[in-house]
Image (tube, helix red, strand yellow):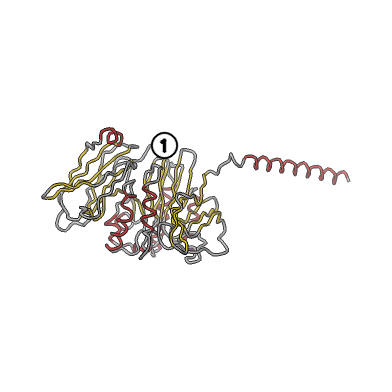
């Protein structure tokens, strides 16, 4: 894999797609491995050759349409991988950037659409991101992956990065990768993309050749990783491993990175710790391996895929979200739902968006379409679930007051009864 790398902050300003015919890109530009001062820009060209990345501050681009910074990209070596990875370094923290990739050939130049990214903010600043999972593949009908991807691309909320909880593709071959990129090309212009491994990726080399991830360990030092981003830490794990040593290494990794100063703690991996799915059972061994650590480290939210429905489960103060609605065929849930299942929705394609402030986490799960017997029906932003952590107190204040009064009355009654008994 090429190791010329870069980072840039982005927010959507407008997406005008290149025509499918004659595009110089097999995979249009996308970004990954963001940090406070760097980001990596990736793309796969139709014909390998020299080019450049033009980038700059978003306010400057919006005011003048110019991208003054240039990162030259030389022609690759003959044995290089098909995907280019170029790291932009020396960026300003907490800053929004715009970039595009320009390819050179013997007859002229071809430019990509502009894309966006932002660098990690300082503590105390708001953070926002999107989560999806189980995009995989379908053989016919409406392209549900594209429905979800385009909905995220047009979401009015600015977000810092996009997380994926695994099963990105049906199988790690170029056929499926090409379909995935065609389906999500607009979404990938919005912000850096950061996945974890699902079982369908098979820990294949193409996964590592395609994506650049935050610093980690395991295979290529990217099999599991951690993203430290202002007030937020996200730990990404691989639940496909078989060796006990890989599980213990990830336990140590999780503890180390969840013990920092960030007030908001998230974990993402593919197989659900808890689920009411009728097709896939809960990963009972995972509750013994990881749940005690999440409770100990006071993790706020764990994101999982694998089960193709939405579910909001709370166990011992940890919120688990099953978010397998990225396009794969929906699955039914069991009639008797698992303990702690507060919300469960079947048959929808959706994504989850998260915003944090210094004190709160706000989570909304947005439906894109519902699968019915006659096909997909657009649901245009319907919320399947919305909640905040810590839980909202304003709306519950009257209930809390009545609860206090009830306890007080009960105490008075108990004292009165005790006095009667003593008196008798």
Q: At x 43% / y 42%, what residue is drawn?
A: 262
Instruction: Tell whether 349 sits left or right of 187.
Output: right
Percent from the top left, x then y, of residue 172? 31, 63
Residue at the image position 41 percent from the left and 37 percent from the top: 123
Q: In the orientation shown, which residue stands out farthest toward the left?
A: 106
Q: In this view, does 261 lie to the left or right of 314?
A: left
Looking at the picture, how far across and down is residue 45, in whole percent? 21, 54
Q: Is residue 320 left or right of residue 138?
A: right
Q: Residues within 10 Å of mark 1 (few under 14, many from 20)?
A: some
The image quadrant where one finds the N terminus is bottom left
Q: Pick whichever, 264 or 170, lies toward us.
A: 170
* Nearer-the-camera pick, 112 or 227: 112
Location of residue 190 with respect to 325 vertically, above or below: above
Identify the residue at image location x=29%, y=42%: 8
Q: How many marks?
A: 1
Determine which quarter of the picture holds residue 392: top right
Q: Name the residue beneath numbered marker 1.
A: 125
Q: What element carries label 1?
A: loop
Q: Which residue lies furthest to the front in this view?
A: 374
Q: Position of residue 234 (x, y in %)?
A: 41, 48
Residue 175 percent location from the top left of the image: 28, 63
**Left or right: where 234 falls relative to 83:** right
- Residue 405 occupies which quadrant of the picture? top right
Q: Nearer the viewer, residue 423 or 237?
A: 237
């Amino acid at each position: 894999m090429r190791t010329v790398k870069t980072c840039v902050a982005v927010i959507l300003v407008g997406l005008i797609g290149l025509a499918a015919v004659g595009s110089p890109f097999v995979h249009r530009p996308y970004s990954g491995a963001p940090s406070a001062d760097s980001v990596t820009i990736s793309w796969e060209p139709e014909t390998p050759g020299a080019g450049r990345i033009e980038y700059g501050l978003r306010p400057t681009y919006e005011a003048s349409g110019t991208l003054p910074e240039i990162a030259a990209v030389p022609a690759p070596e003959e044995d290089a991988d098909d995907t280019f990875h170029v790291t932009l370094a020396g960026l300003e923290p907490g800053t929004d950037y715009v970039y595009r990739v320009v390819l050179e050939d013997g007859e002229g130049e071809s430019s990509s659409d502009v894309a966006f990214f932002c660098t990690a903010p300082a503590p105390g600043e708001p953070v926002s991101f999107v989560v999806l999972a189980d995009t995989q593949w379908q053989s016919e009908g409406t392209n549900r992956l594209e429905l979800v991807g385009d909905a995220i691309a047009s979401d009015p909320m600015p977000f810092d990065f996009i997380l994926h909880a695994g099963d990105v593709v049906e199988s790690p071959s170029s056929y499926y990768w090409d379909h995935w990129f065609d389906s999500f090309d607009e979404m990938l212009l919005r912000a850096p993309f950061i996945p974890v491994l699902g079982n369908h990726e098979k820990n294949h080399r193409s996964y590592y050749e395609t994506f650049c991830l935050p610093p980690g360990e395991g295979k290529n030092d990217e099999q599991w990783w951690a993203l430290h981003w202002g007030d937020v830490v996200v730990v990404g794990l691989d639940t496909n491993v078989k060796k006990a040593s890989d599980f213990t290494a990830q336990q140590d990794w999780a503890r180390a990175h969840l013990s920092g100063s960030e007030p908001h703690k998230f974990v993402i991996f593919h197989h659900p710790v808890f689920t009411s799915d009728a097709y896939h059972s809960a990963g009972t061994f995972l509750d013994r391996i990881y749940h005690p650590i999440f409770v100990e480290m006071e993790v706020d939210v764990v994101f999982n895929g694998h089960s193709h429905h939405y579910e909001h489960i709370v166990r011992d103060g940890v919120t688990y979200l099953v978010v397998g609605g990225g396009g794969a065929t929906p699955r039914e849930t069991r009639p008797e739902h698992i303990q702690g299942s507060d919300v469960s929705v079947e048959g929808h394609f959706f994504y989850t968006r998260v915003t944090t402030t210094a004190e709160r986490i706000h989570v909304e799960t947005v439906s894109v379409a519902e699968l019915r017997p006659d096909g997909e029906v657009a649901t245009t932003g319907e919320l399947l679930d919305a909640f905040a952590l810590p839980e909202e107190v304003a709306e519950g204040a009257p209930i809390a007051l009545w609860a206090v009064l009830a306890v007080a009355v009960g105490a008075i009654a108990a004292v009165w009864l005790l006095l009667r008994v003593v008196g008798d």
